[in-house]
Amino acid sequence: MADRPTVTSDFYDLEALLDDQDRETLHRVRAFMDDEVEPIINQYWTRAEFPRQLIPRLAELGIAGAQYSGYGCPGRSALFDGMVAMELGRGDPSVATFMGVHGGLAMGTLQLCASDEQKERWLPAMARMELIGAFGLTEPEHGSDVARGIQTTARRDGDEWVLDGHKKWIGNGSFADLVVIWARDVDTDRVLGFVVEAPAPGFSAVDLEDKIALRAVQNALITLDGVRVPEENRLQNANSFRDTANVLRATRVSVAWSAVGCSRGAYEHALRYAMERDQFGRSITSFQLVQDLLFRMLGNITASAALCARASQLQDCGMLRDEHASMAKGYSTMRMRETVGWARELMGGNGILLENHVGRFVADAEAIYSYEGTREVNSLIVGRAITGTSAIA
């Protein structure tokens, strides 16, 4: 790759919070995204395909399930895990989402909800990325209200469970080896978790088409038609939606970090463009309005990253609450939407050309803004903490 102007968006040097080993790994992630992902990602984004040939290289980075310990997992801090999510998102939000689903939602579910035997059976291979995971919670008719609205059912039949229903927007769902499915027990009305080992009779996954965002992520509509799952694949420590919520609380902070990464990616591409672009006989970096846009973007990035860093520190010391995760996700994604828009504005018409990358970040931001908790729902979770009154029916 040709030399590019050096830019940085870590204005307050938050990277210095990491130890030497974690910083070295972070730099390897950054180099991988710059050297191996960026040169090819536009063509995969256009074709709505994930560059699956890169999975072995991702595995070599040793970042899958980074914050989890034991069973072959790296056992690093939540702060490190968040900054990795940011670096992945800075390079490409689709790759960040793929890793968030596999290493965050799927591996996180097993870490929190599986028995020791189940962890031993699945987590080491997932940490090596020999088995890829997916997480099936959202349904065609239930997103924000899925806690009360899960329609996928689980019926006990001897030593097996029979699953019926549909799941929608399931990242990695069409090619994952292990798919976590949340379903309601028809006898007890409890929400239980199951691991479906794909392919399985009655299990089908069809990729959603014509998305305008995160096109390189393959989101599936999953149909469960009498899928039989052995009791040994029921997550032994998942007994209510509260257990599901514990998973989502942790991964919501990672999504906030990914939003910071999306902002950083757009900002850095826009800054490089500005450093190379001349108009009216001089570099546009000397224009006051351009410098104002750069100030606005970097301010959003710095504020959001600092907020996420503190949320991860709370997570590391066991103090993270729902409202902390919701504040991080809701605020960072709002600022992300502004930032990618300003990056496009700085580049003028060239900002909508995929070859300049910023247009991809603008589009992908729309998905990050909504998944893993919409801004509206996150604002109400924080509002409940502020007022002591729930506005959610």
Image (spheres, rainbow, N blue to C red):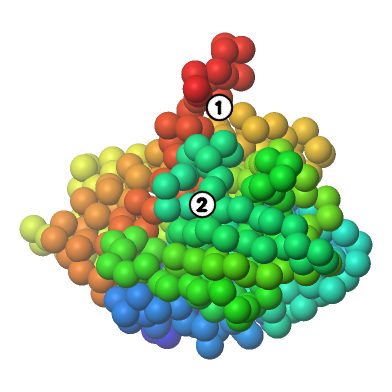
User: The residue under label 1 is which amino acid type?
Assistant: Ile
SS state under label 1: helix
Q: Nearer the viewer, mark 1 or mark 2?
A: 2
Question: Considering only order in the chain, which callout, 2 or 1, is on the residue closer to the N terminus?
Answer: 2
According to the picture, the residue beneath numbered tag 1 turns out to be 381
| Coordinates of residue 142 in the picture (x, y in percent) | 46, 45
| Coordinates of residue 387 in the picture (x, y in percent) | 57, 11
| Residue at the extreme right | 116
134 lies above or below 192: below
5 lies above or below 240: below
Residue 138 disc label: 2
38 vs 304, left or right, is left
122 vs 356, left or right, is right
301 vs 202, nearest the viewer: 202
SS state under label 2: loop
| Residue shown at the point (33%, 42%) measured from the top left | 338
| Residue shown at the point (61%, 19%) measured from the top left | 385
- Quadrant location of the N terminus? bottom left
120 vs 316, left or right, is right
41 vs 70, nearest the viewer: 70
Q: CA distance from mark 1 to mark 2?
A: 19 Å
| Residue at the extreme left | 280
| Coordinates of residue 372 in the picture (x, y in percent) | 52, 47
| Residue shown at the point (25%, 71%) measured from the top left | 354
- From this viewpoint, is residue 18 visible? no
| Residue shown at the point (67%, 63%) measured from the top left | 162
244 vs 317, left or right, is left
- From this viewpoint, is residue 355 visible? yes
